[in-house]
Image (cartoon, rainbow, N blue to C red):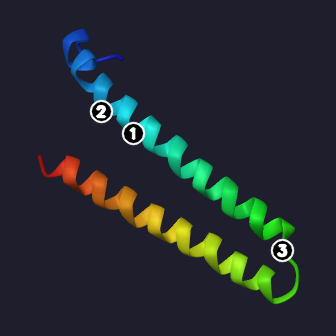
Amino acid sequence: MQGMDKQKHREMMPMHEKMMDEQKKQDAEIDKLVAEMNAATGEKRVDAIVAVVNKLIEQRKAMHQEMAAHLDK
């Protein structure tokens, strides 16, 4: 916290907590899809891999949009 006063840190805490909650939610979504992927066989496994990749892309784009929104403020 060098260079950041305690008041500024306190103001940022709710935003950080929200981000951490969102990351946990996203991790749970990925964990579920990965478990389904690992359990799948044959053509269903390919479909499950596609689902994992698509979810990762979706989450990454959402993260970039959120970061851009914060930088524009």
* Image coords of residue 42 (percent x, y): 87, 86
Q: Nearer the viewer, mark 3 or mark 2?
A: 3
Image location of residue 51, percent across then percent down: 62, 75
Instruction: Name the residue type under label 2.
Output: Met
Residue 25 in percent (x, y) is at: 52, 46
Q: Which quadrant of the structure image shows residue 58?
A: bottom left
**Amino acid marked by disc 1:** Met
Which residue shows up at 77% across the image and 69% down it? Answer: 37
Q: Secondary structure at mark 2?
A: helix
Q: Looking at the picture, how far across and down is residue 23, in whole percent?
A: 49, 44
- Tag on residue 15? 2
Question: In screen coordinates, is 39 left or right of 66?
Answer: right
Residue occupied by mark 1: 19
**Of 15 and 44, which appears nearest the observer?**
44
In the image, 8: left or right of 55?
A: left
Between disc 3 and disc 1, the foreground one is: 3
Residue 4 visible to the viewer: no
Residue at (34% x, 16% y) in the render: 2
Q: Residue at x 38, y 56 (%)?
A: 63
Say what amino acid the circle numbered 3 marks. Answer: Ala
In the picture of the structure, the residue carrying the numbered disc 3 is 40
- Whether pointer 2 and pointer 1 mark residues with C-beta atoms closer than 8 Å, the reply is yes
> Which badge, 3 or 1, comes first in the chain's sequence?
1
SS for callout 1: helix
Q: Which residue ends up furthest to the bottom in the rendered image?
A: 43
Q: CA distance from mark 2 to mark 1?
A: 6 Å
Question: Where 9 falls versus 40 (above or below)?
Answer: above
Q: Is residue 37 left or right of residue 21?
A: right
Judging depth in this view, the residue of 54 and 67 nearest the camera is: 54
